[in-house]
Amino acid sequence: MKIAIIGGAGKMGRWLTGFLQKEGNEIIVSDKDKAGLAKAVESLGVSAASSVEAIAQADIIVLSVNIDSFEQTVKELSPHIRPGQIILDITSIKEQPVDLMHLYLNKATVLGTHPLFGPGAKDVASQNVVLTPTNEAESALAEKVMNYLQKHNARVTLMTPHKHDEMMAVVLGLAHFIAIVAAGTLAEIGKQEELKAIGGSTFRVLTTLVESVISEDPELYATLQMKLPYVTQVEELFQVQTAKWAEIVKNQDRQTFVKQMTALKYKLASNNTNFGQAYENMYKIMEWL
């Protein structure tokens, strides 16, 4: 199978190239970052080509480009797509990219995909992947992709692009927002070395989350915060909750604190059969740190 990866010089593009190569696929990579592309070719031993040349040779095209340049990319590819080709995108937002693929790449069968892991993953085993088919042809393709991923022990979920973006406002938007705000708080407090030296398990897990976000590309995280639909509503709700709990602590209202925390425990446990394992899981994470 010949697969073209557009954006193959990026971290995730290189990861996908390596993963798909192991399956015996012939990979052609393309990227506007010529220096990065040269490094990818050298390190992975794949062929490089312009985007037009790459898609002309490929049966399957993977769009591994950032959200900000997505529309420009599909516009440029549009005249060169032929019927029967398969196009997958891996952006973290799905409604807009899927609509753009339908608009510009309608000769091909397209499928919105979202691997919910980064290039630090060893493989797809135990990793979450979302597929967002919108019609019969895409559903048939999604079934094939799902079977392929499940053979590699990935956890695959199918949903609409709209539902995906609603979920990502929490899964990505809120999680990143909490990490960034916590980072700002820790930076204001200072004393990082002292805190780490005596930090307990909860603090160490928190700082791992904070550093894993803050150490990454701020342009990517800004794009997700600005472009994820519904993220503002979720973060406003978080701020309401923050203010409520801060007020309880400020007022030394122990009874309300205990009552509210107990209610939260039962509410979250009712929707999660593995709720009681969280404390144990935290210590498993600690073993990796």
Image: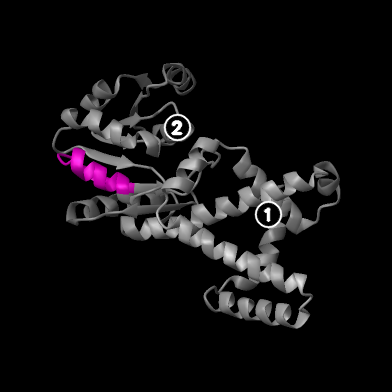
Q: In this view, does 168 lie to the left or right of 73?
A: right
| In the image, residue 164 above or below residue 63 | below
Judging by the rendered image, the residue that carries numbered circle 1 is 285
Residue at (57% x, 63% y) in the render: 238
Q: What stretch is highlighted in magenta?
A: 96-112
| In the image, residue 279 above or below residue 63 | below
Q: Which of marks 1 and 2 precedes in the sequence?
A: 2
In this view of the protein, can residue 208 be seen by the observer?
no
Is 54 covered by the magenta stretch? no
Judging by the rendered image, the residue that carries numbered circle 2 is 18
Q: Is residue 100 left or right of residue 8?
A: left
Image position, residue 156 (x, y; %): 40, 56
Count residues near mark 1 (Cα–Cα under 10 Å), then give few for <14, some for 14-19, many for 20+: few
Residue closer to the observer: 56 or 252: 252
* Residue 192 tag number: none
Q: In this view, does 148 lie to the left or right of 53?
A: right
Residue at (18% x, 28% y) in the render: 80
Q: What residue type is labelled 2?
A: Gly
Q: Which amino acid does label 1 sit on?
A: Ile
| In the image, residue 38 above or below residue 126 | above
Residue at (13% x, 37% y) in the render: 83
